[in-house]
């Protein structure tokens, strides 16, 4: 009888499992396939390192630091150029600052700027507990900057539709600024005043061997507590614990399902499974192009997000080799484009060759010079990335209530409370505290 069995050896399951082991729990992590990392598994080929998922994180991170240190995970500071961010809008590539000063860039009209700076005095309350990202930004900053900001946030994190994504579900920390101070700007200023002097500011860091390397280090730390090729086929309650059928029979006091909702649905009790059908996902394609620096002349920076008024279908282009050490061979560049999602699902009907051609053409338009890559790769995520659409907060409340009826059962992963690596750390801390209580 173990303390905890974690079903799912993707990055979220590995982080939760390693954190629980660090806390002294007798843990077993079961992975259905022959390798860990899941959708975060890096593609290493011909000297290029392409991340099909997130390839960076903000560091330091209070939740991730203890488990990363225990597992010996190395992170490198991104190149100084990572601070340069771009937005492609109306056929022009704008460089923007890392602050609300975006309101003063050439991206929006002067009328939109004047309306945006009035945000601290806007008293209009939200129409309901959940409103769309577009509705939230329009209400706080006006339609000029609001439409732009909502599009960038939705595309950049969820590859989603800003008119459908829930602001409270997708970006709860930003909504909390309004909840606490009645204004995003006032809330940010209050947080800045509360911040302890000397606290290092989080900055972009990257794992030198990619997210696959992070997964490998976590597996190494787990040791015999990790087992591959163990597909869970059944889960049932047994006395004070749970039994998992995964080739053999395993038993534990607690079960953590680190699976996407559509996969967890086949294992959980019926009252929980009935809610899983309401989870929303959207397929995504990641297109990588690489070549000699002269043939792929990327600007120095983190990447370019695509605004609402454009002639391209790519949702964002990350300048991988420009901000992340080791992503391309010496004197070569690598770019990564995101297609599809809830924002533009129809584009994924195109073949891989057609997506590569589209990426080449659109990258050339965005950066203003022709790119001629010698290396290309397409990675498709299907069923894809979770979409925290309006209703997600209410759905999570119902799901938590249903799970609470089954003591010892826990759900985690990017389908519920956050899709980034930092979110996985927050979840690991939450579950760790719950099992110690």
Image: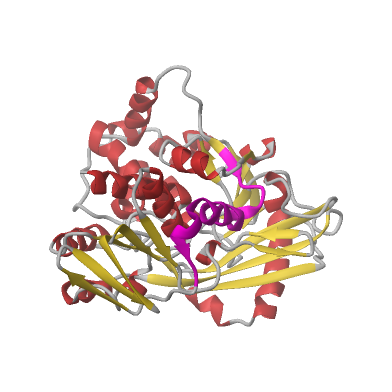
Q: Main secondary structure of the magenta part?
A: helix
Q: Magenta part of the protein: which range?
A: 204-228
Q: Nearer the viewer, residue 414 or 11?
A: 11
Residue 123 on image: x %, y %: 23, 37
Determine if the magenta segment contains residue 369. Answer: no
Q: Nearer the viewer, residue 417 or 129?
A: 417
Up-down: is 34 above or below 403?
A: below
Residue 366 appears in the figure? yes
Task: Quadrant for the N terminus, please.
Answer: bottom left
Q: Nearer the viewer, residue 332 or 30?
A: 30
Task: Quadrant for the C terminus, please.
Answer: top left
Residue 400 on image: x %, y %: 20, 59
Count of marks, rendered view: 0
Q: Nearer the viewer, residue 378 or 43?
A: 43
- Residue occupying image coordinates x 73% and y 49%: 326
Up-down: is 33 above or below 103?
A: below
Determine if the magenta segment contains residue 227. Answer: yes
Q: Is residue 259 left or right of residue 124?
A: right
Residue 174 on image: x %, y %: 35, 42
- Residue occupying image coordinates x 46% and y 23%: 199
Q: Is residue 314 left or right of residue 149?
A: right
Quarter of the rendering containing residue 411: bottom left
Residue 252 on image: x %, y %: 27, 62
- Residue occupying image coordinates x 69% and y 39%: 79
Residue 109 appears in the figure? no
Q: Is residue 64 left or right of residue 5?
A: right
Q: How is the image coloured?
A: secondary structure
Name, please, the residue furthest toward the front. 1
Quarter of the rendering containing residue 154: bottom left
């Amino acid at each position: 009888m173990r303390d905890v069995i974690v079903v799912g050896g993707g990055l979220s399951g590995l982080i939760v499992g390693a954190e629980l082991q660090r806390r002294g729990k007798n843990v077993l992590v079961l992975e259905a396939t022959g390798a860990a990392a899941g959708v975060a598994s890096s593609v290493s080929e011909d000297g290029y390192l392409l991340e099909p998922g997130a390839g960076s994180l903000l560091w330091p991170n209070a939740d991730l630091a203890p488990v990363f240190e225990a597992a010996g995970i190395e992170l490198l500071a991104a190149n100084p150029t990572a601070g340069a961010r771009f937005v492609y809008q109306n056929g022009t590539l704008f460089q923007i600052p890392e602050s609300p000063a975006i309101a003063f860039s050439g991206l929006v009209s002067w009328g939109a700027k004047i309306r945006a700076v009035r945000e601290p005095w806007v008293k209009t309350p939200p129409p309901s507990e959940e409103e769309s990202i577009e509705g939230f930004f329009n209400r706080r900053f006006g339609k000029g900057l609001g439409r732009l900001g909502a599009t960038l946030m939705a595309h950049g994190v969820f590859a989603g539709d800003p008119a459908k994504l829930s602001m409270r579900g997708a970006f709860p920390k930003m909504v909390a600024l309004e909840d606490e101070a009645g204004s995003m700007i006032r809330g940010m200023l209050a947080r800045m005043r509360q911040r302890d002097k000397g606290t290092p500011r989080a900055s972009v860091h990257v794992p030198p061997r990619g997210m696959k390397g992070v997964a490998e280090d976590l597996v190494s730390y787990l040791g015999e507590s990790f087992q591959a090729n163990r597909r869970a086929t059944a889960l049932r309650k047994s006395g004070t614990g749970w039994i998992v059928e995964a080739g053999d029979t395993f038993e534990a006091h607690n079960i953590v399902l680190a699976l996407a909702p559509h996969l967890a649905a086949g294992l959980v009790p019926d009252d929980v499974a009935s809610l899983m059908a309401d989870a929303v996902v959207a397929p995504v394609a990641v297109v990588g192009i690489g070549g000699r620096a002269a043939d792929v002349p990327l600007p120095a920076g983190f990447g370019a997000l695509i605004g609402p008024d454009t002639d391209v279908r790519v949702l964002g282009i990350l300048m991988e080799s420009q901000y992340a050490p080791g992503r391309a061979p010496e004197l070569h560049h690598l770019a990564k484009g995101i297609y599809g999602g809830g924002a533009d699902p129809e584009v994924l009907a195109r073949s891989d060759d057609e997506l590569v051609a589209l990426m080449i053409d659109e990258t050339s338009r965005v950066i203003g010079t022709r790119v001629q890559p010698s290396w290309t790769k397409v990675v498709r995520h299907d069923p894809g990335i979770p979409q925290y659409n309006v209703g997600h907060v209410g759905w999570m409340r119902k799901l938590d209530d249903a799970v609470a009826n089954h003591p010892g059962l826990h759900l985690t992963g990017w389908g519920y409370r956050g899709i980034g690596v930092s979110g996985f750390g927050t979840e690991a801390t939450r579950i760790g505290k719950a099992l110690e209580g």
